[in-house]
Image (tube, coloured by chain):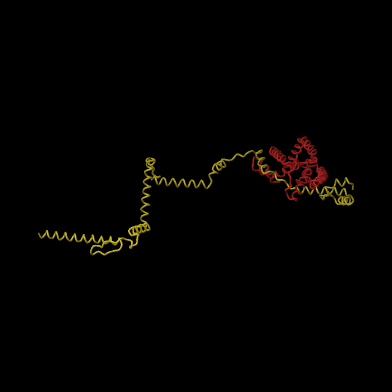
Amino acid sequence: MTHLELENHASDYLEGQLEAVQRVAVEAHLRDCGACRELVGGLRRVMELCRAAENLEPAPWLVPKILRATVGERKPTFRERVSAFFRPTAQPRLAYAVAMAIFSLSVIINAAGLNLRNVTVADLNPRNWFYQANRSGHLLYARAEKFYYDLRVVYEIESRFRQLRSEPSEPKQEAPRQEPAPAGSTERDHPAGTQLASVEGLMSAATSLSAASKMASQRSNTQ
Amino acid sequence: MDSDLELVRRCLKGDDGAWAILLQTHTRKIYNLCYRFTGRTAESEDLTQEVFIKIFQTLKTFDVGQGTFATWLNRVARNHLVDHYRRTKKDRLTASLDDEESGVLEEKPSAEAAPSVHVETRELKELLQRGLDKLSPDLREAVVLRDLQDLDYAEVAQVLGVPEGTVKSRINRGRLELARVLKRMEQVRGPAKAAGSEA
């Protein structure tokens, strides 16, 4: 086999496509010829390099660009356009806003005393709305106040306050000496006792007065 | 492929979705083919787009009897690349003269920061691409279709429109030529690299 023949069969030899006789001839030539060995080695390296070369990835925008250039921008359907229109509204904050609006509206309608099942022309007058709202506000306040004062705890706290106000804040040693109470009264150390004594005094005075008036009336009857 | 034929039928009926699937299936292969021919990313993207526009316009002429859709696609792409090569021959001659004068084969981004193994692989890939650029179009397309696009001899013959014997001969010559070019490039690069590392 000559150098030229080997060169022509080199690819077939490396791809295993040579017949047995030719393959033996090539191998025999390669054993004796360094230049051809180098040639076949270079060829093998090229094939390996090509096999190892991985496919390159095109840019991600290439397919969309070609699509635009061929079939053009696809026209959206009616349904897609409608959904695209409402897409920004499909968010939780819109639901919150709607819920708050409904709540506020119901509060206002309630306060204005409107009956939605039977709306009259007068119901549409803002002055009526204000009047009704004012009335409802006052009623609400009165109910709340009554509820507050009816609470047992409030009652107890208030009675305790009253009691505290009526009791002296200073000890009895520092209190000035009281004049001796009238006859029949029990002397007390503290002003409450004094007050009680004065009340009793008043009552006894009233009793003696009534007795005196009875005696006077009996005398006039006998005369 | 049967699915390709079905997609082509649907495309011809005006189904844009089928065309989108066909595009997604074959863009990568055609882009790689273009890149192996040109060695430039932007140019390959433009060429890929042009090929598919041509395919879209001539889809009616696709004949199932003449081979698969992939073979037809490769043939259209190859013809377009050959036309492009002829159109830009003058520009390329000027560019290659400039490169030789400046002593630079092609400007590539620096890979100094990458690990050494990665750099070596990358350099080999660049070397292969630059070697392919140095081949004549006939030899290059044969080598690219056989060794990089993994077509068999019969398919390459169909794409190139030449007998299988011619294909075998071109592939063998192309590989030998590529081996010589790579060796020469490595010999040129070797001392330069050594000088660079000494500096």
Q: The yellow chain is which one?
A: A
* Rendered image quadrant of residue B25: top right
* Rendered image quadrant of residue B137: top right
Can residue A75 be seen here? The reply is yes
Can residue B67 be seen here? The reply is no
Residue B20 appears at what percent x and percent y? Answer: 66, 43
Q: Which of A72 and B121 is in front in this view?
A: B121
- Is residue A29 rendered to the left or right of residue A71? right
* Rendered image quadrant of residue A158: bottom left
For chain B, give the colour.
red
Q: Which residue is drawn at 52% across and 47% down?
A: A93
Q: Which of A223 and B85 is in front in this view?
A: A223
Which residue sits furthest left? A223
Residue A47 appears at what percent x and percent y? Answer: 79, 48
Q: Residue at x 19, y 61 (%)?
A: A208
Q: Which residue is drawn at 15% across and 61% down?
A: A215
Residue A131 appears at what percent x and percent y? Answer: 37, 43
Residue B21 appears at what percent x and percent y? Answer: 66, 44
- Is residue B182 rendered to the left or right of residue A164? right
